[in-house]
Image (cartoon, rainbow, N blue to C red):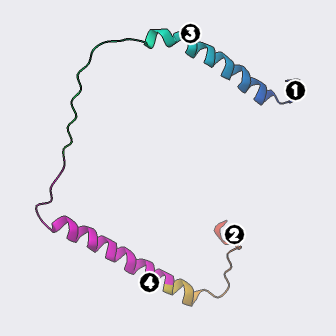
């Protein structure tokens, strides 16, 4: 605390040192060696129809139409709006 005059930074240094010591004290308990056998398998889904693609494309199309409509309405109906006008977001 003499170096920085910041109690939060001093507490952070003390806790970091204490937790580092606790971690290194417990480290030998996690060193367990045994033989293992691993097997990797990856399941993959195969599309069997077009219904999912149609649904996703429809949702994306509706989204883009709404974005365009809202953007056009905003651009045509807004008279006084600037990027730096943050006061409009505060109620």
Place of residue 38 in the rendered image (x, y in percent of width and height, measured from the top left): 24, 26
> Which residue is depicted at the point 67% across and 65% down?
90
Q: First in sequence: mark 3 or mark 4?
A: 3
Magenta span contains residue 1: no
Place of residue 88 in the rendered image (x, y in percent of width and height, measured from the top left): 67, 72
Q: Check disc 4 and report the residue beneath it.
A: 69
What segment is highlighted magenta in the picture? 44-71
Count neighbours of disc 2 (C-alpha within 10 A) and say few if under 14, some if 14 to 19, many if 20 or more: few
Q: Quadrant of the C terminus?
A: bottom right
Q: Single out the mark in the foreground, 2 or 3.
A: 3
Q: What distance separates the C-alpha of mark 1 from that of mark 3?
A: 29 Å
Q: What distance separates the C-alpha of mark 4 from that of mark 2?
A: 23 Å
Count neighbours of disc 1 (C-alpha within 10 A) and say few if under 14, some if 14 to 19, many if 20 or more: few
Q: Check disc 2 and report the residue beneath it.
A: 86
Q: Single out the mark in the foreground, 2 or 1.
A: 1
Q: What distance separates the C-alpha of mark 3 from that of mark 4?
A: 62 Å
Q: Determine whether the residue tagged by mark 1 lies in a helix, strand or loop.
A: loop
Q: Are marks 4 and 1 in contact (CB under 8 Å)?
A: no
Q: What distance separates the C-alpha of mark 4 from that of mark 1?
A: 59 Å
């Amino acid at each position: 605390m003499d170096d920085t005059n910041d109690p939060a930074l001093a507490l952070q240094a003390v806790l970091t040192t204490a937790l580092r010591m606790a971690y290194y004290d417990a480290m030998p308990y996690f060193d367990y060696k045994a033989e293992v056998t691993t097997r990797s398998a990856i399941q993959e889904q195969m599309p069997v129809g077009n219904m999912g693609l149609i649904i996703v494309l429809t949702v994306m199309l509706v989204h883009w139409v709404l974005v365009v409509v809202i953007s056009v309405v905003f651009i045509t109906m807004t008279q006084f709006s600037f990027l730096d006008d943050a006061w409009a977001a505060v109620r």
